[in-house]
Image: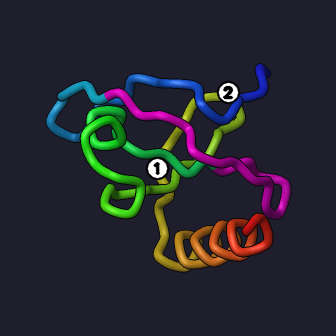
Amino acid sequence: MEKVEVGEVFTIVDENDEEHEVEVLASLTLDGTEYMAVGFVEDIQQISEEDFDIFFMKVDSDGDLSAIESDEEFDKVSAAFEESLDEEE
């Protein structure tokens, strides 16, 4: 499996079969699973860093990005990313 790097751009397909480019903003491993914080490339380019949506995805066993299914998992990942970003400042 190839390591995903911060700054890489991926194309994802949403539930309406529309393609969107997302850029990896950060990554971390939690409980043996790799997670990515990503933002839409078009938003990142147009808006200052404070104003665009960041969302989280996990890297599945095939190395593909997939959605986080449960609120519990999302909350855990969100808190871990927040903590790691606070440490960097």
Q: Position of residue 23 (x, y in %)?
A: 48, 34
In the rendered view, would you say 27 is above or below 55? above
Depth check: 73 or 53 in front? 53
Disc 2 is placed on an element classified as loop
Residue with the mark numbered 1: 67
Give the residues in magenta: 21-35
Query: Which of the 4 image quarters holds residue 13?
Result: top left
Q: Which mark is residue 3?
A: none
The C terminus lies in quadrant: bottom right
Is 3 displayed left or right of 24 in the figure? Answer: right
Q: Position of residue 46 (x, y in %)?
A: 25, 40
Q: Position of residue 48 (x, y in %)?
A: 34, 52
Is 28 within the magenta?
A: yes
Is 27 displayed left or right of 67 in the figure? Answer: right
Residue type at numbered disc 2: Asp
Query: Which of the 4 image quarters holds residue 40?
Result: top left
Is 31 within the magenta?
A: yes
